């Protein structure tokens, strides 16, 4: 009887060992088995404070077929659940559950980028953010005034405050996060430029320099002429002349601008019409880049008061009205595109 009992005990023990071995082998196989995804790369976002179970559900919803109970126990037993970082990630076709969990624990996030070109308006920047599929929208009901308050800005308009650049971010970053970075970079670059200003500028604040830079940015994309055009506007301000720059008129027209400025547009007063109002306009008209900012605070010293487009991206400069009128007749046949 005792021998038979011992035999059964050994048999059960052997079965248990075999079952454990099979279970361990199966677990090892599952942990390291490549997963077949719905696409070569699948993006997903881990929210702050997400549990392994919530992450597993997110993965399955995104098209990453991970076994939820197994993923939860794998994360907890390996203590990787304590290391997982919130953010945007990519699952790659052929990843195993373990490789994917390791990526989450390392915080090896995927990256996206968005570019705000020099000369873009605030409206264009906001539209690009709204249309980017990897940007989380949070500012739909937030007014410009509320946004500026959140940013800590004392200005009344957001125009020109967001530095034009390429911003790298993880999928799921919010529109506010990206705007905050662009605002902070804009403030940093503006202050840096202001510290390099000439001592006798015809304006006295960094914000006025930003306004001037935005006009320069819209007037020319030809780098060598930025300083010269800045010099023209500086000379006009010192003499009390109207700036008479078309980009400010266009900005003031808003949606009414359809690609052409008529004489009546030049005569229609808006806060930004520098044909009807002296001095600088009340706000920037676009987001200027670093080169335009430096040109604004370091204008070229000369006697030019006028310039006209040659039609090839460069300008012809003149010191008096009669010379300017000849240039207008030569280059644009009196079509009203001069300054």
Image: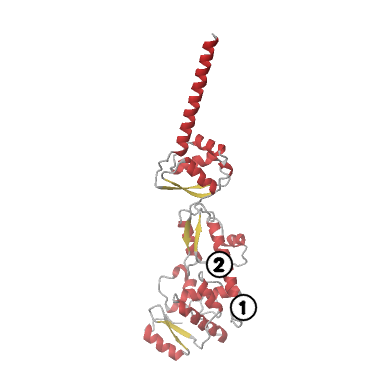
Question: Few, some or many C-alpha atoms within 10 Å of disc 2 (few <14, some 14-19, many ≥20)?
Answer: many
Q: Which residue is mark 1?
A: 204
Does 86 appear above or below 149?
above
Does 172 appear above or below 80?
below
Q: Secondary structure at mark 2?
A: loop
- Determine if residue 7 is in view: yes
Q: Which residue is mark 2?
A: 161
Q: Secondary structure at mark 1?
A: loop
Write the residue at 51% across / 43% down. 101
Q: Residue 337 location in percent, x, y? A: 42, 80
Q: Residue 209 location in percent, x, y? A: 57, 75
Write the residue at 47% across / 71% down. 253
Does 206 appear above or below 199?
above
- Determine if residue 127 is in view: no
What whole-number distance in Å separates the C-alpha atoms at marks 2 and 1? 18 Å
Sequence order check: which comes first, mark 2 or mark 1?
2
Q: Are marks 2 and 1 in contact (CB under 8 Å)?
A: no
Nearest the viewer among 171 and 124 is 171
Write the residue at 48% across / 25% down. 18
Location of the N terminus (image quadrant): top right
């Amino acid at each position: 009887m005792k021998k038979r009992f011992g035999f059964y005990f050994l048999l059960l023990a052997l079965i248990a060992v075999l079952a454990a071995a099979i279970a361990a082998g199966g677990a090892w196989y599952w942990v390291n088995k490549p997963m077949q995804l719905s696409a070569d790369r699948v993006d997903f976002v881990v929210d702050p404070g997400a549990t392994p179970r919530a992450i597993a559900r997110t993965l399955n919803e995104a098209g990453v077929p991970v076994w939820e109970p197994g993923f939860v126990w794998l994360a907890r037993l390996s203590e990787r659940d304590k290391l997982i970082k919130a953010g945007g990630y990519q699952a790659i076709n052929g990843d195993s559950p373990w490789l994917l969990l390791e990526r989450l624990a390392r915080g090896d996030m995927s990256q996206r980028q968005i570019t705000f070109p020099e000369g873009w308006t605030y409206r264009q920047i906001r539209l690009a953010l709204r249309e980017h599929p990897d940007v989380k929208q949070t500012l739909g009901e937030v007014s410009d005034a509320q946004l500026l308050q959140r940013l800590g800005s004392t200005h009344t308009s957001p125009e020109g405050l967001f530095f034009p650049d390429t911003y790298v971010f993880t999928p799921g970053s919010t529109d506010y996060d990206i705007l905050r970075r662009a605002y902070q970079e804009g403030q940093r670059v503006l202050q840096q430029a202001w510290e390099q200003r000439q001592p006798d500028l015809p304006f006295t604040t960094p914000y006025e320099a930003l306004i001037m830079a935005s006009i320069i940015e819209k007037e020319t994309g030809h780098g060598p002429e930025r300083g010269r055009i800045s010099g023209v506007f500086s000379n006009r301000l010192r003499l009390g002349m109207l700036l008479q720059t078309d980009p400010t008129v266009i900005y003031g027209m808003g949606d009414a601008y359809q690609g052409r400025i008529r004489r009546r547009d030049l005569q229609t007063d808006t806060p930004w019409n520098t044909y009807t109002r002296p001095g600088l306009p009340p706000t920037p008209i676009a987001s200027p880049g670093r080169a335009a900012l430096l040109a604004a605070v370091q204008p070229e010293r000369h006697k030019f008061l006028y310039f006209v487009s040659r039609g090839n991206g460069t300008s012809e400069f003149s010191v008096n009205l009669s010379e300017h009128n000849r240039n207008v007749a030569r280059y644009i046949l009196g079509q009203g595109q001069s300054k």
